[in-house]
């Protein structure tokens, strides 16, 4: 494992992600860990619920390769056409 010069630094919402994980959209299922940002590999629409929100929102025509600085709690399969998404925490 490589040396991490920042391992003793505190994490924050504006700090770079320390963990990345693949996200598969699922209806009615919250992520096991909320993401502080979302990478979209293949563009399209994303139906999601932000941390602290009670309703879903649709982002239309998100471009491939975009990093969205949104704290994500859930991504719904219904209404989501984007793919290859990675949660950044």
Image (cartoon, rainbow, N blue to C red):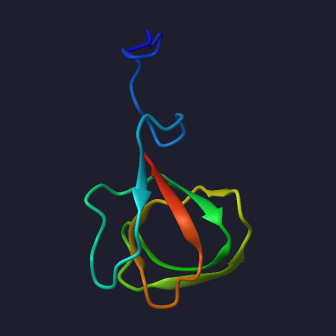
User: In this picture, is 1 found above or below 24?
Assistant: above
Q: What's the residue at 54%, 35% (across, down)?
A: 16
- On the picture, is 61 further left or further right than 2? right
Using the rendered view, name the quadrant where residue 43 is placed.
bottom right
Quarter of the image with the C terminus is top left
Where does the image place residue 35, in percent across and percent down from the top left? 42, 55
Q: Would residue 45 be found to the left or right of residue 16 on screen?
A: right
Q: Is residue 79 above or below residue 59?
A: below
Above or below for 88 versus 47:
above
Residue at the limit of the structure toward the bottom, as seen here: 78
How far across and how far down the image is residue 27, in percent? 33, 85
Q: Residue at x 49, y 55 (%)?
A: 86
36 sits left or right of 51 in the view:
right
Q: Quadrant of the N terminus?
A: top left
Viewer-side residue, 25 vs 31 = 25
Q: Which of the 4 image quadrants contains residue 59?
A: bottom right
Q: Residue 41: percent from the left, percent from the top? A: 63, 60
Residue drawn 44% across the image and 85% down it:
56
């Amino acid at each position: 494992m490589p040396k991490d010069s920042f391992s003793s630094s505190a994490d924050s919402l504006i700090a770079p992600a320390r963990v990345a994980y693949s996200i598969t959209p699922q209806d009615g299922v919250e992520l096991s860990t909320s993401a502080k940002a979302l990478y979209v590999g293949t563009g399209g629409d994303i139906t999601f619920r932000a941390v602290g929100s009670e309703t879903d929102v649709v982002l239309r025509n998100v471009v491939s390769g975009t990093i969205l600085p949104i704290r994500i709690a859930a991504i719904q399969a219904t209404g989501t056409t984007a793919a290859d998404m990675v949660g950044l925490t």
